Image (cartoon, rainbow, N blue to C red):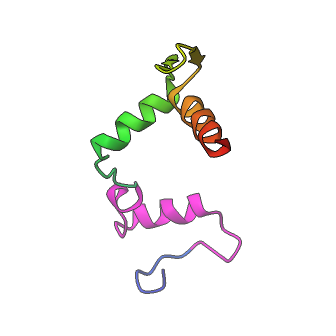
Amino acid sequence: MVDNNITGYNSRTPKLVLLSLLFDADVLTPEDILPTKEPIDPKYVRVRTLRANPKEVTYTDTATGEVTTYDSVYKAKKTRKRSNAKK
């Protein structure tokens, strides 16, 4: 601030006021402050969609013919993992 001859602030000046002073002095531009969005990996988008919008899963045991329905893929995996660990 001293290097750019900006006055009218002290240690208790809010950030917004400091930013406006820097904008007025052409030290900062909005691009300097706004975050840039990085591209999202398509695999992550698919997983995020699966978690946000779960689909019902039906599991049929071929040996016994037992049909079990789960609310989501994650619950099915969790339950199947537990049942396989008990065997």
Q: In the figure, 2 relative to 24: above or below?
A: below
The front one of 7 and 34 is 34
Left or right: residue 15 versus residue 59 is right
Q: In the figure, 57 relative to 23: above or below?
A: above
Residue depicted at 58% across the width and 34% down the height: 80
Q: In the figure, 73 relative to 4: above or below?
A: above
Instruction: Say whether residue 17 is magenta.
Output: yes
Residue depicted at 31% across the width and 52% down the height: 38
Instruction: Say whether residue 11 is magenta.
Output: yes
Q: Which residues are magenta?
A: 8-34
Residue depicted at 59% across the width and 20% down the height: 71
Residue 9 in percent (x, y) is at 61, 73
Quadrant of the image occupied by residue 15: bottom right
The front one of 55 and 66 is 66
Residue 12 in percent (x, y) is at 71, 71
Q: In the figure, 12 relative to 76: above or below?
A: below
Residue reaching furthest to the front: 63
Quadrant of the image occupied by residue 69: top right
Residue reaching furthest to the right: 12
Residue reaching furthest to the bottom: 3
Q: Quadrant of the C terminus?
A: top right
Residue depicted at 60% across the width and 31% down the height: 75
The front one of 28 and 38 is 38
- Count every numbered label the image shows and give the total: 0
Residue 42 in percent (x, y) is at 28, 41
Left or right: residue 11 versus residue 66 is right
Residue 68 in percent (x, y) is at 58, 16
